[in-house]
Each structure stands twice: as C-alpha cells, then as structure tokens.
Amino acid sequence: MILTRRFLLVAAAATAASAAIPIETKAAAGKIFRPRKLAWVVGTPGEYNFELIRAATPEEAIKLWMAEQCEGFAEPGEPCDCMACTHELVSYRMAAFDQIRNPSPGDWIRAGMGAHCDRCGYECDPEMGARAIADTAVCESCLTPEENAKDLEGAL
C-alpha cells in the first residue's frame, strides 16, 4: 500500500472526527465516564498560525498539525522543505479549551493567545491591548471610548 498525502490527510481527519465522538463507559462507582482528548494549541512561535488540536500528548498534537499544514508530508515523522516543517513548532496545553468545541476569537484572547480583530482584521493579542468583547476579539485601536471606560470601571 502506498501512503499518499491525501491518504494521510483523510486518516488525520478521520482520527480527529472520531475523537469528537463521545465514548461512554461505566466507571467502578457506576458513574458514566467519557474519556476525551486534551486540548493543545500548536503553531510557530511569533506567528498567528496556532490551531486547536485535540490529542493525548504534545507530540501527537504536533504530528496532527503537520499532517494538516505540511505541503509535502510524505511519511509520518519525515519532514519536507515546506514552511510547516522548516519552522520551529511548539504545542501548549490549553485546558481552557477542553470544554469548548470551537473557540471563538474572544475565547482565544481570554486564553492569552492571539487572534484577528473582528473589526479591522489585524492581528492582536492581550499583550498589545486586545480585549475579548463577548465572543469577538477587538484590538486596542478599535476599542470605543465606552469599552475602554468599562474596562477602567472594572479595574477600580
């Protein structure tokens, strides 16, 4: 059998989809137990390419990210010359996303990560003054005076 990129992408997608299906088992005390994969964010430090990956380990999360991003992923563990393979990848445990299926831009800001401003489209993060307003991410430049005043009232 020849492993093609398409086969690996379909296998990764099927694995990710199957991880979302709850598996119920009875624990010793008779309670229902639903094992779940942990939430990791994987990407390149300093870039806005982080994605939520559900995996058991940080290494598995990086492999799944590479399978999605790599342009010439030939064999698992064999990087090519594409941007995904030539840049340093990191994975961070993101417990805040364990119970969130599809995090909104506001969820990413609340978790201390970056997002794109929902008003102007530029990259923003909490260190640059971005705020989460409901489920949206808003950069410091796009905050209205009323939103800034509300933040000041909360700080007092």
Image: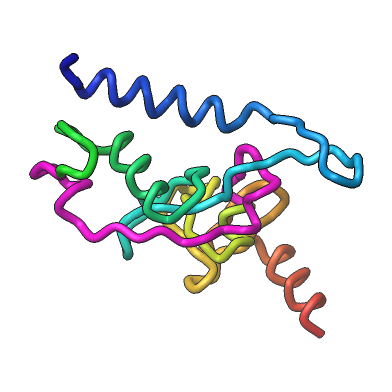
Q: Is residue 95 positioned above or below 134 on the image?
A: below
Residue at the far top in the pictured view: 1
Q: What residue is at 47 percent from the left and 48 percent from the top? A: 120
Residue 138: quarter of image: bottom right
Q: What residue is at 15 percent from the left and 44 percent from the top? A: 79
Q: Is residue 142 positioned above or below 13 on the image?
A: below
Q: Position of residue 64 (x, y in %)?
A: 37, 40
Residue 140 appearing in the image:
no
Q: Position of residue 6 (x, y in %)?
A: 25, 19
Q: Quadrant of the C terminus?
A: bottom right
Residue at the far bottom in the pictured view: 156
Q: What residue is at 21 percent from the left and 24 percent from the top? A: 5
44 with respect to 96 (left or right): left
Residue 27: quarter of image: top right
Q: Is residue 24 magenta?
A: no
30 with respect to 70 (left or right): right
Between residue 34 and residue 27, name the one nearer to us.
27
Residue at the far front in the pictured view: 28
108 with respect to 46 (left or right): right
Count of all numbered marks drawn on residues in the image: 0
Q: Position of residue 105 (x, y in %)?
A: 57, 48
Q: Quadrant of the N terminus?
A: top left
70 with respect to 41 (left or right): left
Q: What residue is at 29 percent from the left and 57 percent from the top? A: 89
Between residue 123 and residue 93, name the one nearer to us.
93
Residue 108 appearing in the image:
yes
- Find the magenta span and give its range: 79-106
